[in-house]
Amino acid sequence: MLIDRTVVEVRSGHGGNGAISFLREKNVPKGGPDGGNGGNGGSVYFIAKKNINTLLAYRHSRLIAAEDGGKGDKKMRFGASASDVYAEVPCGTLVYVEGESRPIADLKNDGDKVCAAKGGRGGRGNAAFKTSRNRVPKIAENGESGEKKRIVLELKLLADAALVGFPSVGKSTLLNIVSRANVPTADYEFTTLAPNLGVVTLEDGINQFVLADMPGLIEGAHEGKGLGIAFLRHIERCRVLIHVVSMDGTRDPYHDYEVINAELRDYGAGLENRPMIVVCSKMDVEGAEERKKEFDKKLGFESYGVSALTDDGVALVMKKAFELVQKTPEFPLYVPGEEEEGGIKVYDAHLESKGPVYTISHPSDHLFVISGEEVEARYSRMNLSSDQGVAKLIAYLNSLGIDAALREKGAKDGDEVRLCDFVFEYTD
Ligand SMILES: Nc1nc2c(ncn2[C@@H]2O[C@H](COP(=O)(O)OP(=O)(O)OP(=O)(O)O)[C@@H](O)[C@H]2O)c(=O)[nH]1
Ligand SMILES: [Mg+2]
């Protein structure tokens, strides 16, 4: 069975707590603070791998968790950062947060990855909070919490072209003869229950494309009739559709043709606008030629005729399909960064006239300086001789999003950050 959609829970690790400790040595009566930082919690990533074909691995393992970061310790010992977890998925997997309609990633190519749950940052130990006014800080930060999310993984097959049509028109038979696929075929409807893929090699022995054989569609499929149309999501990426219509005389070909086109349209993803090759199958059956002539007349152009029995016309259709695949651009399902415009900017005359709350400058390697009228005014009002005072300052800086701003400016682990005479270490 092809597992093409699954829900998993991801959990990243908590950051380790920073330590509060003071150096105690025989000959050093009043040693300074030496509590180390906690380590970062591990993150959970999904990564596309070309040697994986299904989401089967996630059918039973429903939880993907990364470990917590280690605690900081005395003597400046830093807690260990936990390893990130990379969960492997097939190329062509879309990753969604459950309940959201927009994917967070489209992992198309081998090695594409996305962070689904970010590990919590380790807390700073008390050694990081020494100031000229408070040389013995008795506070440390706790590590940030990890994230917990439910993630929907959806596999959209990466086929270049797809065979669509009513049941029993010979789609699977066609796939079998043009590729090494060995898909069951039979003279009853809905033989194929899930899409199959085959690699088609043209007569030149060089050019190839991937062809998908889809389950049959019937009238009302978009309302759930037959096998429904949910499986059509697999062909959203296809550049070309090969629409197979049977000329065996058991059905009205033109009516079938219109019904399938309507179902493609009702699917709602623009499939009706895909370049399409119309193929009349079973041309070996008596009366097929006449039926095709009639059909082409209604169509207004000449369709391709094939017979899987005699092999007639098959190579030509594959060549045409390849040419169309070549000249049709890809249909991206999700363009990163192309977010919808949204949100309303709130203007605040008070804030705007005063300039930014803070700015960050980077005067030398490993040094960042926070300045600004407002942040400096707040700082000067704080009593930093007590631990509560320092804790208040840290909470204030956190509320300004200083850490993220520093990261953006290129701050690295261990860099020094100054605000007036308050100095602390940046941690990633
Ligand atoms: N005479 C003749 N019979 C064919 C030809 N192609 C397929 N058939 C027969 O038609 C029947 C249906 O073929 P399938 O390939 O299973 O049809 P399908 O379109 O994949 O059907 P579903 O999977 O149910 O949608 C089988 O009995 C095939 O042997 C052909 O070119 N000529
Ligand atoms: Mg089939």
Image (cartoon, grey):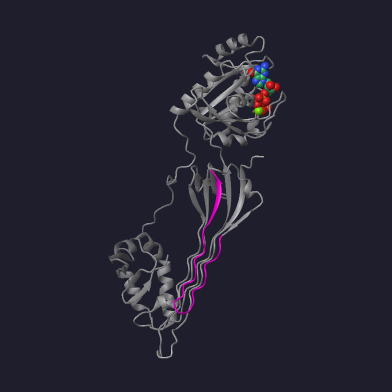
Is residue 193 highlighted in magenta? Answer: no
Prevailing secondary structure class for the magenta stretch in the rendered image: loop
Which one is nearer the viewer's eye here, 225 or 289? 289
Image quarter of residue 131: bottom left
In this picture, residue 227 sits left or right of residue 92: right
Is residue 72 highlighted in magenta? Answer: yes
Residue drawn 62% across and 36% down?
230
Magenta-highlighted residues: 66-90
Q: Is residue 120 visible?
A: yes
Q: Specify the quarter for ligand 2.
A: top right
Q: Is residue 268 above or below residue 289?
A: below
Quadrant for the N terminus, please. Answer: top right
Which one is nearer the viewer's eye here, 370 or 328? 328
Q: Is residue 120 above or below residue 20?
A: above
Image quarter of residue 353: bottom left
Residue pushed farthest left? 363
Image quarter of residue 148: bottom right
In this picture, residue 363 sits left or right of residue 86: left
Quadrant for the C terminus, please. Answer: bottom left
Residue drawn 52% across and 64% down?
82
Q: Position of residue 88 (x, y in %)?
A: 55, 49
Which one is nearer the viewer's eye here, 87 or 257? 87
Q: Is residue 167 visible?
A: no
Q: Position of residue 327 (x, y in %)?
A: 43, 27
Q: Position of residue 288 (x, y in %)?
A: 63, 11
In this picture, residue 418 sits left or right of residue 207: left
